[in-house]
């Protein structure tokens, strides 16, 4: 048996899966937590990855890393980070993003240049903030990497003379690489960094080999977390994936690059050579976690409470912008609760309102995606709840399919490792995950919930 490994280095944790390269069967897995916050020392990710690999890699022949996108890892001439990494969910760069959009000539100019319009999350906006607020550290920066790039480099030894690598999926989230042309826009890099042009990682093809570990294992190109999830799920044209992690992401596969001047749709590349139009929200499962804490319970307890409230929570509505929001672009917004009356000030109504508010925000983002879905796949930790899956079908007004629980980002990375090991024009054929379908029995109810949510949202933020 040939054995490969895949890594999901997310905001919350490092997950390692070890798979049979021929069948995709998961043989073993381990998860190590990451520290919380929007700034993290990259060395802590590396420590977590090494801990995850401990005693798990004995027969592994190839490994690939999938990582959280956009994060800024700036390293000096010795390859040492000059500061803690700024993560995708750090919104201090919101004003910097607005500056950059204006300086290039507006949203359409950015959409045409790199397929996406900068928001606070994008690396290019973080670089502008970095140049303006920490110029001495910017001067010391010799290379700019993403979290996945940094970990792939460390797997290969992390030597300063070794050229770091990335892939199309990761590069497309920076704001200075064009999915349409396949080239960096170093002029945009220099504009963001006020004239500085540090080195950038070499962009690898999907099945290209990045290098080898000091012990001789093949290291594949790796990719971003969403591109890896698409690979792990084996999505086809017309499939739309809704991922309910800490944040929410909605993406689909396309054979053509996208360029949305509204800034809502990110024109990313995928991990197969195609493209991955994607919409992202900052708030998804974090809304449920925060509400459960407020109510003195856990996620299971939140679901028990929510089941006692009818669809619509008797008119209680939560705008779930707890950490600002990316879609819609409201980096300074906060969450708010509407429809409070004596009858609705009950824990079970708040639990239901939290779930529905999260899903209404996701549904708004879903509507921005320029596609008619053939199938909706609901994944992520929150998707494992039958109540949430039913609520999603109601609010989306469509059937949703929930694949059997699995670490699909890490599995996608493992599939890429098997592809790099075996070669060929296409990734290995692994079975498509089985899924349970949830149908909407009351589409009018979902439409009413969304209408009330939209009325409140527009009154406060338009």
Image (spheres, grey):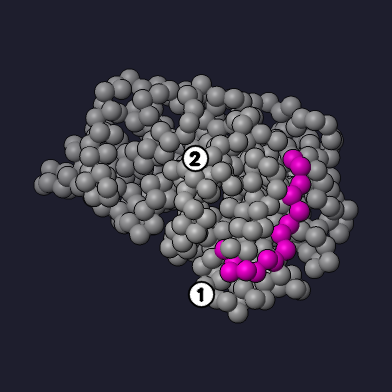
Q: Measured from the top left, where is residue 15 in percent x and y?
A: 63, 50
Q: Can you see residue 315?
A: yes
Closer to the camera in the image, 76 or 381: 76
**Distance of label 1 from label 2 (alpha carbons):** 30 Å
Element under label 2? loop
Examine the rendering and report whether any part of residue 296 can be seen. Answer: no
Which residue corresponds to the image point at 88% horizontal and 53% vertical from the top-left?
216
Q: Is residue 426 left or right of residue 295?
A: right
Sequence-wise first label, 1 or 2? 1
Q: Is residue 295 magenta?
A: no
Q: What SS does tag 1 mark?
A: helix
Q: Compared with residue 210, is residue 427 higher up or lower down, i.e. above or below?
A: above
The magenta segment = 192-206
Residue corresponding to mark 1 = 133
Total labels: the figure holds 2
| Residue drawn at the location 83% of the way across and 56% of the way down | 213
Chief secondary structure of the magenta span?
A: loop
Check the picture and name the quadrant holding the N terminus.
top right
Q: Measured from the top left, where is residue 86 in percent x and y?
A: 55, 64
Q: Identify which residue is drawn at 59% across, 47% down.
A: 114
**Which residue, given by chain and number where applicable, does mark 2 sit on?**
260
Q: Residue extending furthest left?
A: 342
Q: Provide residue 148's location: percent of width, then percent of height.
A: 67, 54
Relative side of 89 to 312, left or right: right
**Residue 26 vs residue 307: left or right?**
right
């Amino acid at each position: 048996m040939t054995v490969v490994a895949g890594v999901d280095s997310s905001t919350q944790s490092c997950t390692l899966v070890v798979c049979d390269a021929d069948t995709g069967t998961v043989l073993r897995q381990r998860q190590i937590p990451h520290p919380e916050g929007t700034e993290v020392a990259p060395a802590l990710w590396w420590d977590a990855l090494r801990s995850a690999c401990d005693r798990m890699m004995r027969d592994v022949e190839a490994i690939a890393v999938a990582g959280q996108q956009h994060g800024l890892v700036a390293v000096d001439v010795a390859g040492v980070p000059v500061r803690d990494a700024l993560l995708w969910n750090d919104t201090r760069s919101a004003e910097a993003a607005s500056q950059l959009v204006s300086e290039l000539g507006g949203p359409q100019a950015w959409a045409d240049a790199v397929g996406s319009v900068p928001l606070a999350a994008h690396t290019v906006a973080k670089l502008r903030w970095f140049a303006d607020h920490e110029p001495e550290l910017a001067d010391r920066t010799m290379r700019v990497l993403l979290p996945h790039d940094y970990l792939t480099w460390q797997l290969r030894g992390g030597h300063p003379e070794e050229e770091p690598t990335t892939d199309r999926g990761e590069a497309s989230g920076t704001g200075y690489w064009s999915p349409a042309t396949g080239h960096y826009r170093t002029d945009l890099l220099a504009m963001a960094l006020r004239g500085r042009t540090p080195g950038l990682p070499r962009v690898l093809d999907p099945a290209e080999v990045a290098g080898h570990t000091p012990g001789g294992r093949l290291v594949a190109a790796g990719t971003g977390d969403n591109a890896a999830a698409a690979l792990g799920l084996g999505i086809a044209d017309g499939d739309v994936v809704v991922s309910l992690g800490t944040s929410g992401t909605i993406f689909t596969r396309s054979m053509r690059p996208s360029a949305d001047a509204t800034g809502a749709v990110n024109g990313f590349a995928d991990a197969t050579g195609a493209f991955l139009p994607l919409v992202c929200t900052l708030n998804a499962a974090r809304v449920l976690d925060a509400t459960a804490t407020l109510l003195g319970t856990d996620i299971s307890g939140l679901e028990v409470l929510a089941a006692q409230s009818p669809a619509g929570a008797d008119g209680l509505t939560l705008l779930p912008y707890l950490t600002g929001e990316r879609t819609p672009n409201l980096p300074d917004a906060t969450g708010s609760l509407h429809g409070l009356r004596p009858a609705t000030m009950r824990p079970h109504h708040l639990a239901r309102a939290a779930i529905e508010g999260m899903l209404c925000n996701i549904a708004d983002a879903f509507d921005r995606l320029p596609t008619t879905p053939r199938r909706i796949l609901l994944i992520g930790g929150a998707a494992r709840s039958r109540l949430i899956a039913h609520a999603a079908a109601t609010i989306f007004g469509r059937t949703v399919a929930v694949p059997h629980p699995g670490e699909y980002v890490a599995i996608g990375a493992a599939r890429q490792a098997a592809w790099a090991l075996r070669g060929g024009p296409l990734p290995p054929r692994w079975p498509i995950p089985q899924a349970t379908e949830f149908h909407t029995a009351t589409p009018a109810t979902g439409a009413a919930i969304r209408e009330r949510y939209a009325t409140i949202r527009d009154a406060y933020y338009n």
